[in-house]
């Protein structure tokens, strides 16, 4: 069994709906076929941005994203949307989904208030187990995101790793682990794409 097959099996066993697409284009086409006439919020994600989902889904839905619209209003509208689309910092082959956040909007919407959540990842975000997924989120994803925003933190200025710093610009202020689909949600779908995407 491949690591992708194992990941899908374990995600499904935890109540998520997991699917694999060889390419980003196939994943985007699938999402476009599933979502029409909805309000959709987007969480900050280089993976989602690289796929052009905001533009593609905006044809048949009302879409909100603070990267593309006025920040405060987009945050508010995204938090009230029916559907939420984001990525994860890491997914364990054992089925746990890990996200680190500074503002909280992204992780909050994966926990409550949505009927549907789509978590989109590239194969680079899959780790062998929970401990390795947590390590990846803290020592690869978070420092790379801090560098992207040019934060004044040790992980930007020094070696690529978590220093568990106390900088006010630290972006890893909250950690959320999804061990299963939250009870209040109809569907949490994890879309795995056979490409390296995001951090």
Image (tube, grey):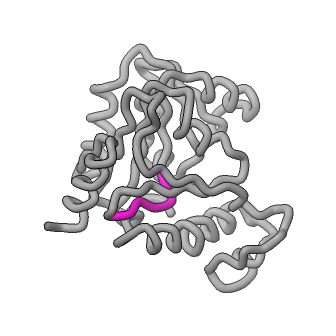
Q: Residue at x 41, y 64 (%)?
A: 125
Q: Residue at x 41, y 60 (%)?
A: 91
Which corner quadrant holds the N terminus?
Answer: bottom left
Q: Residue at x 47, y 50 (%)?
A: 178
User: Based on the displayed image, in which of its 4 quarters is residue 79 positioned?
Assistant: top right
Looking at the rendering, the stretch of residues picked out in magenta corresponds to 88-93
Q: Is residue 194 magenta?
A: no
Instruction: Name the outermost residue toward the left.
Output: 1
Q: Is residue 90 magenta?
A: yes
Q: Residue at x 48, y 59 (%)?
A: 198
Instruction: Name the outermost residue toward the front.
Output: 183
Q: Residue 47's x, y, as percent?
A: 46, 52
Q: Is residue 183 left or right of residue 170?
A: left
Exactly how many numbered labels are in the figure? 0
Q: Residue 39's x, y, as percent?
A: 50, 20
Instruction: Name the outermost residue toward the right.
Output: 168
Q: Is residue 7 left or right of residue 39?
A: left
Q: Residue 184's x, y, as percent?
A: 47, 28
Q: Is residue 187 above or below residue 101?
A: above
Q: Nearer the viewer, residue 165 or 14?
A: 14
Q: Residue 153's x, y, as percent?
A: 78, 72
């Amino acid at each position: 069994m491949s690591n992708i097959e194992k990941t899908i099996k374990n995600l499904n066993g935890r109540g998520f709906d997991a699917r694999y697409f060889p390419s980003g284009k196939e994943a985007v086409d699938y999402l476009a076929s599933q979502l029409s006439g909805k309000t959709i919020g987007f969480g900050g994600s280089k993976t989602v941005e690289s796929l052009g989902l905001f533009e593609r889904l905006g044809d048949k839905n009302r879409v909100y994203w603070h990267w593309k619209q006025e920040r405060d209003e987009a945050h508010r509208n995204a938090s009230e949307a029916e559907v939420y689309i984001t990525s994860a910092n890491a997914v364990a082959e054992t089925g746990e989904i890990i996200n680190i956040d500074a503002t909280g909007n992204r992780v909050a919407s994966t926990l409550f208030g949505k009927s549907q959540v789509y978590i989109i990842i590239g194969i680079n975000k899959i780790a062998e187990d929970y401990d390795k997924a947590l390590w990846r989120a803290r020592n690869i994803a978070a420092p790379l995101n801090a560098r992207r925003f040019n934060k004044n933190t040790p992980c930007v200025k020094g070696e690529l790793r978590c220093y568990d710093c106390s900088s006010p610009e630290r972006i890893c202020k909250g950690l959320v682990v999804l061990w299963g689909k939250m009870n209040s949600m109809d569907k949490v779908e994890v879309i795995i794409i056979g490409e390296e995407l995001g951090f």
